[in-house]
Image (cartoon, helix red, strand yellow):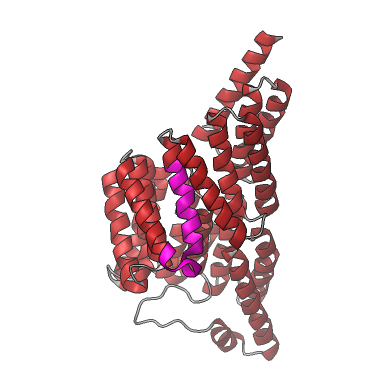
Amino acid sequence: MTLLPRKQTILLLTALFLMSCTTRDLPKDQPAEPVAKKSFQIKGKDSELKRLNEAGKLSTEVERYVRQGKYNQAEPLCKRALEIKENILGKNHPETTTTLSNMGVIYTGQGRLKKAELAFKTALEIKEKTLGENHPDVASVLNNLADIYKKKRGYQQAETLLKRALKIKENAFGEKHIKLSVTLNNLALIYKEKGDYEQAESLFNRSLKIVKEEFGKDSPESMMMLVNIAELYSNKKDYKKAETLFKSILKTAKKNPGKYTSQQAITLNNLGSLYLSQGKLKLAESTYKKSLSIKEKIYKKDHYSIANTYSNLAALYTQQKKYKQAEKMLKKDIDITSKTFGRNHPDVAWSLSKLAGIYQIQKKYDEAASLYEDSLEIIYKLFPKNNPGIRMIEKQYNAMLLERGKKK
């Protein structure tokens, strides 16, 4: 299975955040109005205007941290901005619910899916009552809520919400507006997960066409869309087509390395996973290492994107039966991911279960049992117990207990 880079997850969350930030989605004939001006007209007090300006500055800082994937730093600032808006504008004001929705994006990034879902549902209910069910702001929250269901593998629920969001945006902006691109991309990802590759490809291409017209065919935004399409080909086991597209992306990126450095690293990471899925282990290793080398130059050593490549290298070394190296890579992955998102994040849980599997292979049953239990403790809090990922870890854990019992 091809492992997707966490960088893409961060980019998606950033896009979702920006969709509902201070300048909200509005139809062409309804221009956005600055929050401070609108709030001053409502309250008319200099002290309140000053506090709303403070909230605006806090939101700018929150946006910066979300772009960097620093959700723990963003959380207290967003809470403060929300508190200010609730006190001055009231809980039912559109600007307040926008900040509440942004809190949901932060919770999503932290892996606190229950809190994120509650924030989005509350924001959605208020926006539907105050703005109407077909307002573009409603579509933004629908996008965010759909992402929660996708993470919980509730694909049908996610699909329903995204179709509604897409219809709202098409009615508000037209069928070719850039504001449709994220929703089209998200809906395509749902169809990809469901195995409806024809529908997914159609939506990816529609989104790509919009992005190209807005930013240019060789823009970083277009490159990321092409990465998604290449991943789709990989899922379809059309490996030749996927490899050709990945290499085309790399060729474009190399023409302007300063502009496309992160895209180059992500593409190499995914190309390495493509080789790994085909059993081309030497090619996979050299490609992963190229990706890692670029990431180490452009990011700090504890950046979340580097953790993903460590995880992929661990999968490679496990296949090569180089268990000590795999263990080392996974420990680095867990350390970075825990520092970035907190110990109770699903990415930490999955990596703990992988490390448990490596200990199990080496018959280190006590270490394996402890890690399986830690992993399950985290994900039981985040997902329903019928989640396929949970069932898989439970199956591995029970197999390990049986194996350990026989050895004793």
Q: Position of residue 267 (x, y in %)?
A: 45, 53
The residue sitting at 66% across, 54% down in the picture is 340
Nearer to us in this view, 18 or 85: 18
Nearer to us in this view, 14 or 223: 223
Question: Is 248 on the left or on the right of 146, as rendered?
Answer: left
Q: Is 257 colored magenta in this rendering?
A: yes
Question: Is 229 on the left or on the right of 49, as rendered?
Answer: left
The residue sitting at 36% across, 41% down in the picture is 235
The residue sitting at 73% across, 23% down in the picture is 366
Q: Position of residue 141 (x, y in %)?
A: 47, 61
Question: Is 181 on the left or on the right of 141, as rendered?
Answer: left
User: What is the magenta segment's predominant secondary structure?
Assistant: helix
Q: Is residue 272 visible?
A: yes
- Name the quarter where the C terminus is drawn: top right
Q: Position of residue 78 (x, y in %)?
A: 65, 67
Q: Position of residue 61 (x, y in %)?
A: 64, 72
Nearer to us in this view, 241 or 2: 241
- Name the quarter where the N terminus is drawn: top left
State the count of labels: 0
Residue 335 to residue 42: above or below:
above
Nearer to us in this view, 31 or 354: 354
Q: Is residue 225 visible?
A: no
- Tell me where the magenta segment starts and ends, as one range: 254-274
The residue sitting at 45% across, 81% down in the picture is 32
Q: Is 403 colored magenta in this rendering?
A: no
